[in-house]
């Protein structure tokens, strides 16, 4: 982990314990290993394109709606792609991921 505060906060650590999630170590500061960077931000940008919001609450509501529309299969695919990237980076000594 990159030791970012949100990753190590008591709330985050407790939430991971409650759902029995296991933290996976990866090289710090590697943006191509973050599901947010290679999937989530692009998907949100695409779905929010051309929209405007009168309040931050409206934006948050729309983002929650988008999140709830992601299918289980889509999220599983994101996880599998993340796992593939992680293994590649480990096998290549921490180099940036290159898709094949």
Image: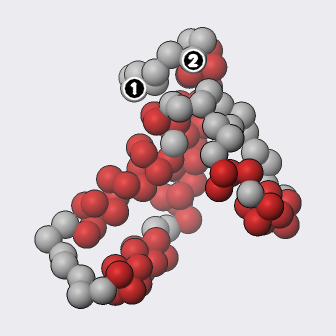
Q: Which quadrant would the C terminus be assigned to in this image?
A: top left
Q: Is residue 69 visible?
A: no
Picture residue at 34% right of the left edge, 63% below the top: 44
Local crowd size for mark 1, using a 10 Å CA cut-off: few (<14), some (14–19), many (≥20): few
| Quadrant of residue 89 within the rendered picture | top right
Q: Image quadrant of residue 46?
A: bottom left
Q: Position of residue 11 (x, y in %)?
A: 76, 66
Judged left or right of residue 37, residue 23 is right
Residue lying at the far left of the rendered structure = 50
Rendered residue at 57%/17% (across/down) = 94
Which element carries disc 2, helix, strand or loop?
A: loop
Task: Report how far apart the C-alphas of labels 2 and 1 lie in the structure.
Answer: 15 Å
Q: In the figure, residue 62 lies in which quadrant?
A: bottom left
- 12 to the left or right of 70: right
Q: Is residue 37 above or below residue 52?
A: above
Q: Position of residue 73 (x, y in %)?
A: 53, 60
- The residue shown at (39%, 26%) is 99
Q: Is residue 57 above or below residue 39?
A: below
**Residue drawn 32% across the image and 53% down it:** 42
Q: Is residue 18 above or below residue 58?
A: above
Instruction: Look at the numbered disc 1 and give the secondary structure of its residue.
Output: loop
Q: Which residue is mark 2?
A: 94
Q: Is residue 60 left or right of residue 82?
A: left
Image quadrant for the N terminus?
A: top right
Which residue is the site of mark 1? 99
- Residue 22 x %, y %: 79, 48
Q: Earlier in the sequence, mark 2 or mark 1?
A: 2
């Amino acid at each position: 982990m990159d030791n970012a505060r949100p990753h190590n906060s008591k709330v985050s650590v407790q939430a991971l314990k409650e759902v029995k999630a296991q933290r996976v170590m990866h090289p710090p500061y590697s943006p191509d290993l973050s599901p947010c960077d290679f999937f989530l931000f692009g998907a949100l940008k695409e779905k929010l394109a051309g929209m405007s919001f009168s309040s931050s609450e409206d934006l948050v509501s729309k983002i929650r709606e988008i999140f709830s529309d992601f299918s289980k299969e889509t999220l599983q695919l994101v996880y599998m792609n993340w796992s593939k990237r992680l293994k590649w980076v480990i096998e290549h000594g921490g180099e940036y991921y290159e898709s094949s």
